């Protein structure tokens, strides 16, 4: 088995190649390409497999992880988003559940909704 793992972060893209045939683990790190993460992934795959003399066709498993979406949410840099919901449920995600760190703390702060109310629209059914 030959497996490769790719972790795309905001600063670096890390790759790890496990070659069970040779019993070897090889790693490679390169700068991420925030505007086009696939570019960094493909460049890293090409470099790492070439350096190790492994054909990309021989890979039997690929795992991919990223913090790109999490970072976009935390930094507020995501795309403008709308939400369609069943009629009567427009505010459900903002109302949320009663579960909170301190059940009887009525002053608990809630995070801002990911989709502002004016971009949430109800439809008769989904």
Image (cartoon, rainbow, N blue to C red):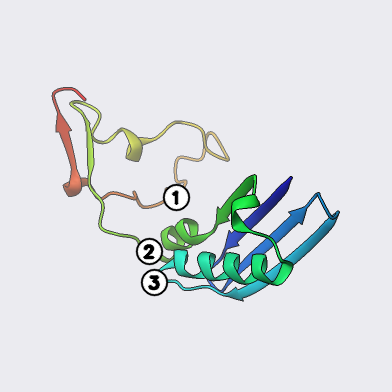
| Residue in front for this viewpoint, 53 or 99 | 53
Above or below 103: residue 67: below
80 relative to 38 in the view: left or right = left
Give the spatial CA distance, label 1 vs label 2: 18 Å
Q: Which residue is drawn at 57% across and 39% down?
A: 102
* Farthest bottom residue in view: 31
Labels 1 and 2 touching (C-beta < 8 A): no
Give the spatial CA distance, label 2 vs label 3: 16 Å
**Lower position in the chain sequence, tag 1 or tag 2:** 2
Q: Which of marks 3 and 1 is in front?
A: 3
- In which quadrant will I find the N terminus? top right
According to the picture, the residue beneath numbered tag 3 turns out to be 35
- In which quadrant will I find the C terminus? top left
x and y percent of residue 28 in the render?
69, 70
According to the picture, the residue beneath numbered tag 2 turns out to be 76
37 relative to 19 in the view: left or right = left
Q: Nearer the viewer, mark 1 or mark 2?
A: 2
Tag 2's secondary structure?
A: loop
**Lower position in the chain sequence, tag 2 or tag 3:** 3
x and y percent of residue 91 in the render?
26, 36
Tag 1's secondary structure?
A: loop
Tag 3's secondary structure?
A: loop
**Lower position in the chain sequence, tag 3 or tag 1:** 3
According to the picture, the residue beneath numbered tag 1 turns out to be 109
| Residue in front for this viewpoint, 36 or 125 | 36
Q: Which residue is drawn at 34% across and 61% down?
A: 78
| Residue in front for this viewpoint, 55 or 119 | 55
Q: Residue at x 34, y 49 (%)?
A: 113
Q: Residue at x 48, y 62 (%)?
A: 71
99 relative to 112 in the view: left or right = right
């Amino acid at each position: 088995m030959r497996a490769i793992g790719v972790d795309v972060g905001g600063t670096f893209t890390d790759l790890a190649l496990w070659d069970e045939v040779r019993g070897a683990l090889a790693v490679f790190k390169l700068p991420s390409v925030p505007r086009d993460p696939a570019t960094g992934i493909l460049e890293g795959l090409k470099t790492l497999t070439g350096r190790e003399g492994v054909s990309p066709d021989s890979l039997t498993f690929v795992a991919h992880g990223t913090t790109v979406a999490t970072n976009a949410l935390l930094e507020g840099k995501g795309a403008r988003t709308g939400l369609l919901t069943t009629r009567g449920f427009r505010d459900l995600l903002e109302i949320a559940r009663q579960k909170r760190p301190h059940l009887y703390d009525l002053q608990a702060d809630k995070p801002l909704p990911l989709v502002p109310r004016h971009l949430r629209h109800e439809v008769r059914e989904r």
